[in-house]
Image: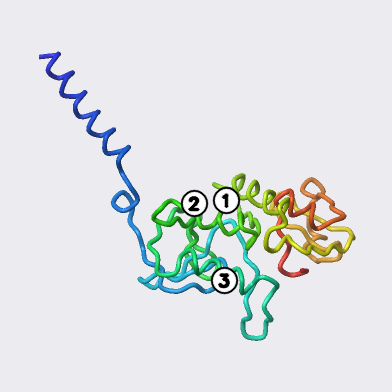
Amino acid sequence: MARTLKTFYYVILSFLLLILFTCNYAYCYELYEVKWVNDGDTIVLKDGRKIRYIGINAPEIEHKENKAEPYGDKAKEFNKKLVYLQKVRLEFDSEKHDQYDRLLAYVYLSDGTFVNNEMIEKGFAYCLPNPPNLKHEKLFLKSQQNAMKLKKGIWQNWKENNGEYVANLRSKRFHNKKCWFATKISKRNIKYFTRKWDAFWEGYAPCKKCF
């Protein structure tokens, strides 16, 4: 009897392992079709949900009174080539929505391509740490540093205005010295840079208010 049970459990375990190792994205995960690409870091699914890529920020495209930032249109086009009308898998982190009620997600193509990371790796976006959603922060920073070394996308033709920049160890943002937010950083969370490049290299993202 004991031998029979042991054999039964062995068969069940072998079956489960077979499912695990032969499983592919098409039936192991729910996939959603991308209906629209807003820009380099935001898409709309066929079911109407707006998805904001976690952990990255792409240059802005022209929007109302705001002019397009350098590489904004190229970032959108690259994102479109990756995901438009494609089936994607969503992975979530600690917080699921932002202040605009967009769904925050790590996005994967059906072949396993990690879209968030691909945007950074090709130089069409930079790291945008947003605690507590930091699951892939180290991967993103490694990809960004590689893109910076190779001068890809936004990192080519880099123009540096040396100055004094103040970074917040907690928020992972850096500011112009005179920015109001810079004056509010506690001494234990403060770090100084003389080049924006160095701040980006260490994984800090620029403050939207002063840059």
Count all numbered tags in the image, as a single digit: 3
Residue 96, position as x, y percentages in the image: 48, 58
* Number of other residues with Cα within 10 Å of mark 3, as a class: few under 14, some 14 to 19, many 20 or more: many
Residue 160 left/right relative to 111: right
Identify the mark nearer the N-term, 3 or 1.
Answer: 3
Q: Residue at x 48, y 69 (%)?
A: 43
| Cα distance in 3D space between marks 3 and 1 | 26 Å
The three-letter code of the residue at mark 3 reads Lys
The residue where tag 2 is placed is 93
Residue 128 left/right relative to 206: left
Location of the C terminus by quadrant is bottom right
Q: Nearer the viewer, residue 136 or 103?
A: 136
Residue 109 left/right relative to 14: right
Residue 206, position as x, y percentages in the image: 73, 62
Q: In this rendering, which labeled residue sits more in front, label 3 or label 1?
A: 3
Identify the mark nearer the N-term, 2 or 3.
Answer: 3
Which secondary structure lies at badge 1?
A: loop
Identify the mark nearer the N-term, 1 or 2.
Answer: 2
| Cα distance in 3D space between marks 2 and 3 | 24 Å
Q: Are marks 1 and 2 in contact (CB under 8 Å)?
A: yes
Residue 5, position as x, y percentages in the image: 14, 19
Q: Nearer the viewer, residue 44 or 18?
A: 18
Query: Quick check: 155 above or below 192?
Result: below
List the single residue furthest toward the left: 1
The three-letter code of the residue at mark 1 reads Pro
The three-letter code of the residue at mark 2 reads Asp
The residue where tag 3 is placed is 76
Which secondary structure lies at badge 2?
A: loop
Q: Residue at x 69, y 81 (%)?
A: 67
The residue where tag 1 is placed is 132
